[in-house]
Image: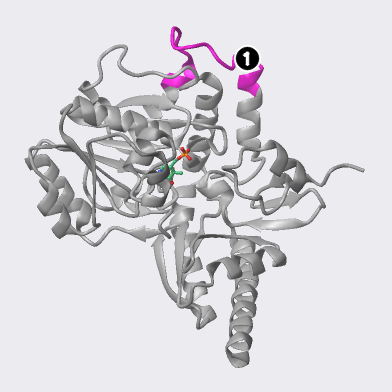
């Protein structure tokens, strides 16, 4: 008899890994199948990673072709996919001719590059980040992360980082000539898909400019078209000094990048940063295929359209559990009136729907950008049932008290 996969996972994987919900076997489009052959509608997409859904032919073809041509070369050599992706990112970010791109392999590595960039803008100055933010798990990125529970077990963390509340007043009080960079997520994904206050980025741009502070945006979760524009900052009429990107850029092939704008593009000098795998032809070919398909299939527009369709349909369910809907495009946070997000997600999973609870009272939806009418309809049907059965269970519990 084979050992059940949960036991094998628990025995072989590091204790830092939470218990997995399912063992998945394969996927196609917006659906995945587990090892028992059960199908699930995937409204998490590997946490905003599988932009084109699963096994998209464009990505399959690009990766297959690249791995059978040349997969990796080291930083001593250039490759065509690498330069093409850097040029593409300069174009879609609006950084243009004054843009530069650094490639790493993950969101955390993009943030590490951002922290080093900040140090190049004032080595002994402070970096400002926000409370309740999430920037990754490596030492630098966890130091920037505004959740004490993630940071404290690893203290002492990287010095010179301060966390402030996400208000314009707190920003006005904190910013000054002793600051090298302000790093913020335009929409805090891990906090439950919570946008910045109205006017925050606009005011942040003014203040950072006045004090020579870099405005660095963590667009790791919001980028690659997910919010209905290539990057979330583009809906605010501002230009940042840098954006950290990863997740959805290459549709599941690991990649991360820091894109700089204007004078921030001159801060690193030769040899000051690098990565063995960063920008290798395999990952960058995947990035070109994914971003190319997002562009040619109009998936940025689709994210905006499907996002508003979903918002309207979720509100129309009329569930007493739904308090508010947050986010933009296909990064949606459903704020609940009761701390039952985990129960709603568990019910959904039983019904064949993958959604996620970043905290007790928020549900996060981040489906593939290829979402169509059929998936929206099925989602609403399953989500309605998950909410109703959670509500019913709550009423039963209350009645029995
Ligand atoms: C996922 C995420 C990160 C970290 O990315 P990894 O690839 O897991 O290292 C950082 N910032 C934000 C906003 C994220 O969503």
What colouring method underlies this structural image? one colour
At 46% across and 22% down in the image, what residue appears?
A: 278
Q: Which residues are magenta?
A: 65-83
The percent coordinates of residue 334 (x first, y second) are 46, 68
Residue 252, located in which quarter of the rendered image?
top right
Q: Main secondary structure of the magenta part?
A: loop
For residue 89, say whether it is visible.
no
Residue sitting nearer the eye, 359 or 15: 15
Q: Quadrant of the N terminus?
A: top right
For residue 222, say whether it is visible.
yes
Element marked by disc 1: loop
| Residue located farthest toward the top when viewing the structure as drawn | 76
Relative vertical location of residue 60 with respect to residue 184 in this rendering, above or below:
above
Q: Where is mark 1, residue-wise?
A: 69
Relative vertical location of residue 226 with respect to residue 392 in this rendering, above or below:
above
Q: Quadrant of ligand 1?
A: top left
């Amino acid at each position: 008899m084979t050992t059940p996969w949960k036991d094998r996972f628990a025995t072989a994987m590091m204790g830092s890994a939470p218990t997995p919900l399912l063992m998945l076997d394969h996927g196609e489009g917006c659906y995945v199948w587990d090892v028992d052959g059960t199908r699930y509608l995937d409204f998490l997409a590997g946490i905003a990673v599988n932009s084109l859904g699963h096994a998209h032919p464009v990505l399959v073809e690009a990766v297959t072709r690249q791995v059978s041509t040349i997969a990796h070369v080291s930083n001593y050599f250039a490759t065509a996919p690498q330069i093409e992706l850097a040029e593409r990112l300069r174009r879609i970010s609006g950084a243009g001719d004054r843009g530069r791109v650094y490639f790493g392999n993950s969101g955390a590595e993009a943030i590490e590059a951002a922290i080093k960039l900040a140090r190049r803008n004032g080595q002994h100055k402070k970096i400002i980040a926000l409370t309740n933010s999430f920037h990754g798990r490596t030492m630098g990125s966890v130091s920037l992360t505004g959740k004490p529970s993630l940071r404290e077990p690893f203290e002492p963390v990287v010095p010179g980082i301060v966390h402030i509340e996400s208000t314009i007043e707190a920003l006005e009080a904190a910013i000054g000539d002793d600051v090298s960079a302000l790093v913020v997520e335009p929409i805090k994904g891990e906090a439950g898909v919570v946008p910045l206050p109205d006017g925050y980025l606009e005011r942040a741009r003014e203040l950072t400019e006045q004090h020579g502070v870099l405005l660095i945006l963590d667009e790791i979760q919001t980028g690659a078209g997910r919010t209905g524009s290539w990057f979330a900052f583009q809906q605010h009429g501002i230009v940042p000094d840098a954006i950290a990107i990863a997740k959805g850029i290459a549709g599941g092939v690991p990649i991360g990048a820091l894109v700089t704008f204007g004078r921030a593009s001159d801060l690193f000098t030769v040899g000051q940063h690098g990565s063995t795998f960063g920008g290798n032809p395999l990952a960058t070919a995947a990035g070109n295929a994914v971003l190319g398909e997002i562009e040619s299939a109009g998936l940025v527009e689709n994210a905006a359209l499907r996002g508003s369709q979903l918002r309207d349909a979720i509100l129309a369910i009329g569930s007493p559990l739904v308090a508010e809907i947050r986010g933009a495009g296909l990064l949606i946070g459903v704020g609940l009136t009761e701390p039952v997000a985990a129960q709603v997600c568990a019910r959904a999973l039983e019904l064949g729907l993958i959604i996620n609870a970043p905290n007790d009272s928020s549900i996060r939806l981040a489906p593939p950008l290829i979402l169509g009418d059929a998936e929206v309809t099925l989602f609403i049907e399953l989500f309605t049932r998950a909410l109703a059965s959670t509500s019913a269970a709550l009423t039963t519990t209350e009645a029995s008290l």
